[in-house]
Amino acid sequence: MAGLTAENFDDGRADVRGGVTGPVERVVVVGAGIAGLTVASALAHGGVECVVVEARDRIGGRLHTVDLAGSPVDLGGSWIHTPIGNPMRAFAQQVGVPCRSANPMPELAGFDRGEERRLSAAEVEASLSLQFEAFPEAVARLREELGPDASAAEAIEAFVAGARLAPGPARRARQALHALIEAEAADLAERQSLRWMWNEIEYGGHYFGDVPAGGYRRLVEAMAVGVHMRLGVEVAEVVVAPGGVRLRCGDGTSEEGSHVVVTVPLGVLKLGELRFSPELPPDRRAAIERLGFGRYEKVALRFDEPFWRAEGVPHVMIFPRDPGDPVVLAIGLDAFGAGPVLAFQVFHSAAGRVLGAAPDAAAQWALDMLAEAIGGPCPTPAAVAVTSWADHPRSGGAYTHIPPGASPADADLLGEPVGGRLLFAGEHTQSARLAYADGALTSGIREAKRLLGQPSVHLGRVVAGTPHE
């Protein structure tokens, strides 16, 4: 194969996992998210014929950067969390995509709609300390006190009750901690297992870490160079036979291969519209049912200038009037080189405010909160982008979490081959970095290693490859 530019990557393990039947001659990958593209890039470097079949008319899956009136905005994954030693950060370095620190915490402001006032710097610092220090430090004790079946919501209530805070700070503590868990789990704190919360391994560096300059699309596009793809083609059925696999597509075409790697999100597997013949084993279907897959949406507003910075709110956490609603976080992307864009992070329990709403209505909901925070009207945005991950049949939600009654073993089970020819990848198919884009990346490396039978793989631009169809 002509001209390759690559480095060695592994999935954190030196061994090669088994479970593959027969010679690997042609691999069909379902889904062009980062997991599917990783598999295909590694196979291309390994000299194995591969095609990626993607239902959307674009690549990237839940890594989706849009051009919002000239500003690159990530509507899905945004950060490379804990970037030191993170393979996603290593890949960015390899392909020449610069990254910059993107921690909003040092400039974070706070506004309490219930008390109709801006929080002092000391109050913001106390809230952040509670969220990122005091509560995490108490989790081990709370697990012992509440037992293995407890939810994160029960832990929050026990923690706040034990802190003996005044009514206002206690309300804000609950709202902030529920937002923290909903951001982590993309679901209600009641549906996040306390036992398995923050069970993932951590790399080095700050949690908020880096963002790729120009958005995640630069990493997605770099991974896709030279990969053979069919876009806008939905796979309706995956048929596995002793001698190979056949995929029936919605447009009447089909793809055949020796093996298939299914990388669609857990939310798509939960919808059940992708058929398998024979059916997936009962233990896999049960794991799909047990694992959680919730909501996390964004409202991105592009303005002519970052007026919020002059108003003293470079980034702001907004505490709702309703004590049962979690904090809404608005992040000024101008701080990270993306232009005058304010991105509202809409966690699970608030997602109904924007899902199904017209973009103007969703933008107004966000602007009304911001107007209160700055004490005056906001200018009209030049452009608006509103996500609908939870309503889209190609995603079915945001990312995976472990509810009470499930365990990390459920995710690991979903990463095991079925029948020697049906393989799976995606953030939901491993527990080490569940929910993270880099977890999807390493799951793709894992399956490429398995198919190639080697302890590491090459990733990056395949200089001589097949263009997109």
Image: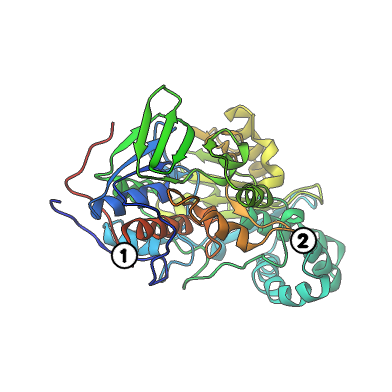
Relative image position of residue 178 (x, y in whole percent): 73, 57
Picture layout, residue 388 above or below residue 282: above
Q: Residues within 10 Å of mark 2 (few under 14, many from 20)?
A: many
Disc 2 marks a residue whose amino acid type is: Ser
Identity of the residue furthest to the front in this view: 242
Read off the residue under disc 2: 151
Residue 69, picture quadrant: top left
Q: Secondary structure at mark 1?
A: loop
Is residue 127 something one can see in this rendering? yes
Query: Which quarter shows the C terminus?
Result: top left
What's the residue type where badge 1 is placed?
A: Gln
Q: Furthest-top residue in view?
A: 252
Dot placed on the residue nearer the N-terminal end, 2 or 1: 2
Identify the colour scheme used.
Answer: rainbow
Q: Nearest the camera: 101 or 221?
A: 221
Q: Residue at x 75, y 62 (%)?
A: 152
Would you say 71 lies left or right of 395 here? left
Say which residue appears at 64% left-offset and 48% top-offset: 282
Residue 377 visible in image = no
Report the Cα–Cα distance between label 2 and label 1.
Answer: 41 Å
Image point 24% across, 44% down: which residue? 226
Mark 1 = which residue? 454
Question: Which circle marks residue 281 in the picture?
Answer: none
| Residue 228 in the image: above or below residue 145 | above
Q: Residue at x 55, y 37 (%)?
A: 387
Q: Position of residue 10 (x, y in %)?
A: 36, 66
Taking depth in this image into account, of 344 and 136 the one nearest to the observer is 136
Q: Residues within 10 Å of mark 1 (few under 14, many from 20)?
A: some
